[in-house]
């Protein structure tokens, strides 16, 4: 089967907390060609008026990959990585995320539906990220697609 | 920091952001992004796995292009001005592709007591194909 498991439609995960590690941010920065010091160096970030090194705008997604899993795992969701595509990723920002923050994530499986006569199956997840100060720093919506394998 | 900060007060609809070119996206870059992002899907780093999935070779993470496109935006305006950022993944980015990011101001408006810009953004690969179609909302400093 290459469809998302409808059993989990509407599922709300238990909150999961993850620490934003400086080394992780530096590796991410290296991968994307980010060389500005506020994204790499604590002293430089503080001097620029930030609490610590900044997490870049799309790093929020990574926290979901790095956090302990509290909801259904890929297998339970019916995900087959051979046929998985990323459809859309969307953030709204209420604040910034910094190295050393502890971010608590919570997500809800909002939609599951098919398109193209079942050739593609969609799952949309909505999620919030809240820091250790109780401030919600971002909301995220992600759309995953599973394509039906060629017979 | 590179270049001079734009004069945000003088911006008009249609004004373009400085483009950013990234790549070629080597296997090494994909390995770094795999570790840096925590996205360990083997389709981005394991060519055996990719071939088993019916692809010719590994493909880049869509989120890698989104991150590079985000870098173009934050090189233009500080990240704390960013209110929203979203991307649709339109086409696959193969390994070895070069990613070109571009964007322009599509709207100037007031929202939540701030003067904001809507940016229309995209990434393209060598053959001109659009791989990401994206928008961002930024508040003017």
Image (spheres, helix red, strand yellow):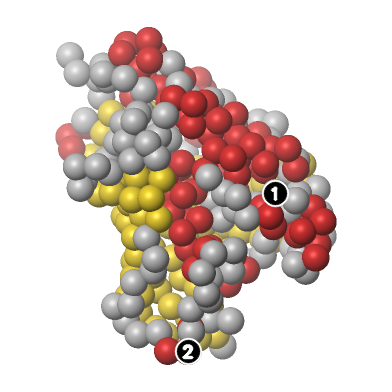
The residue beneath circle 1 is: A40
Q: Which residue is depicted at the point 56% across and 55% down?
A: A57
- Quarter of the image holding residue A82? top left
The residue beneath circle 2 is: B9
* Structural distance between the alpha carbons of marks 2 and 1: 30 Å
Q: Chain of mark 2?
A: B
Residue B50: x percent and y percent? 35, 17
Q: Which residue is depicted at the point 75% across and 51% down?
A: A41
Q: Quadrant of the C terminus of chain A?
A: top left
Relative horizontal placement of residue B135, taking residue A72 as reference (left or right): left
The answer to whether one can see residue B50 in this image is yes
* Label tally: 2
Residue A43: x percent and y percent? 82, 56
Check disc 1: other Cα within 10 Å, few if <14, some if 14-19, many if 20+.
Answer: many
Q: Which residue is depicted at the point 22% across and 32% down?
A: A118
Q: Chain of mark 1?
A: A
Q: Which residue is depicted at the point 48% across and 78% down?
A: B6
Check disc 2: other Cα within 10 Å, few if <14, some if 14-19, many if 20+.
Answer: few
- Quarter of the image holding residue B96? top left
The answer to whether one can see residue A145 in this image is no
**Mark 2 secondary-structure assignment:** helix
């Amino acid at each position: 089967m290459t469809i998302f498991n409808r059993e989990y439609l509407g599922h709300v995960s238990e909150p999961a907390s993850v620490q934003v590690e400086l080394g992780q941010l530096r590796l991410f920065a290296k991968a994307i060609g980010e060389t500005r010091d506020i994204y790499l160096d604590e002293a430089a970030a503080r001097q620029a008026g930030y609490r610590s090194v900044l997490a870049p705008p799309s790093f929020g997604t990574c926290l979901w990959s790095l956090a302990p899993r509290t909801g259904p795992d890929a297998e339970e969701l019916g995900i087959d990585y051979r046929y998985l595509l990323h459809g859309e990723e969307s953030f709204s920002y209420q604040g910034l995320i910094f190295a050393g923050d502890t971010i608590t994530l919570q997500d809800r499986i909002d939609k599951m539906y098919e398109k193209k006569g079942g050739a593609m199956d969609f799952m949309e997840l909505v999620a919030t990220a809240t820091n250790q100060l109780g401030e919600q720093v971002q909301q995220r919506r992600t759309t995953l697609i599973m394509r039906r394998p060629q017979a | 920091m590179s270049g001079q900060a734009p004069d945000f007060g003088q911006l008009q609809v249609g004004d373009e952001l400085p483009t950013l070119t990234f790549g070629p996206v080597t296997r090494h870059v994909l390995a770094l992004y795999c570790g840096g992002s925590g996205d360990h899907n083997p389709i981005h780093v394991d060519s055996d796995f990719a071939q088993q999935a019916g692809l010719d070779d590994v493909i880049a993470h869509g989120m890698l292009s989104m991150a590079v496109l985000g870098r173009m935006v934050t090189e233009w305006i500080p990240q704390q001005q960013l209110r929203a950022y979203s991307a649709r993944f339109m086409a696959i980015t193969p390994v070895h592709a070069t990613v070109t990011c571009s964007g322009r101001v599509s709207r100037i408006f007031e929202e939540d007591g701030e003067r904001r810009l809507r940016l229309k953004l995209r990434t393209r690969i060598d053959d001109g194909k659009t791989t990401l179609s994206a928008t961002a909302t930024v508040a003017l400093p």
